[in-house]
Amino acid sequence: MAYLTFDRKAVFTQEETRKVLKLTTKYYEMDMTLENMLFGLLDGYLYPELKGLVAEAGFEAADVLFIDLLLQKLPMQRYNLIEEGMIHTDDLTFSDAEEMLQRYESTYPEINFWVEPAENRK
């Protein structure tokens, strides 16, 4: 499963972090994959499928809106596409990084790709 990493402490407020934790307990056992993706947010991992799964899972409208607004904060950072531990492409927007990650993973499944914030490799 593809994911993007981000610095949760730099992006989310304490209140937003608490709200994500509350959502994991509110929707506990609704969908194990979705639950793991929500917990991933707390560790700084974003799974590109999260937004679509939240919308399909029957979350309350306010919770869907919260997740959407939270994810909109991520494009403010710049990202690097990493291939086997080395920078493949740097200084990407969030949407470009997400698109490239999905494309490369489907084309080269035997190679380990991930995306991380650009400041991790300064």
Image (tube, rainbow, N blue to C red):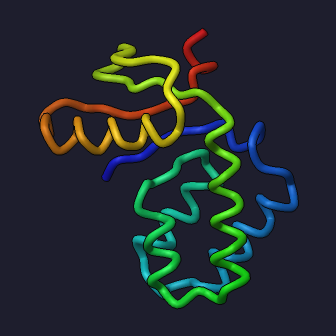
Q: Where 17 falls versus 91 (above or below)? A: below
Number of numbered discs on residues:
0
Specify the farthest residue to the top: 122
Residue 15 rendering spot, x and y as whole percentages: 87, 61
| Closer to us: 121 or 94 | 94
Residue 7 image-quadrant placement: top right
Question: What residue is at 63 percent from the left and 65 percent from the top?
Answer: 68
Q: Where 49 falls versus 63 (above or below)? A: above
Question: What residue is at 61 percent from the left and 9 percent from the top?
Answer: 122
Residue 60 rendering spot, x and y as whole percentages: 65, 89
Residue 111 image-quadrant placement: top left
Question: What residue is at 30 percent from the left and 32 percent from the top?
Answer: 113
Please give left or right for residue 30 compared with residue 11 in the image: left
Question: What residue is at 13 percent from the left and 38 percent from the top?
Answer: 107
Residue 31 image-quadrant placement: bottom left
Residue 76 rendering spot, x and y as whole percentages: 68, 36
Please give left or right for residue 77 compared with residue 107 in the image: right
Q: Where 68 falls versus 87 (above or below)? A: below
Q: Where 29 falls versus 71 (above or below)? A: below
Please give left or right for residue 68 compared with residue 46 in the image: right
Please give left or right for residue 103 compared with residue 24 in the image: left
| Closer to us: 43 or 66 | 66
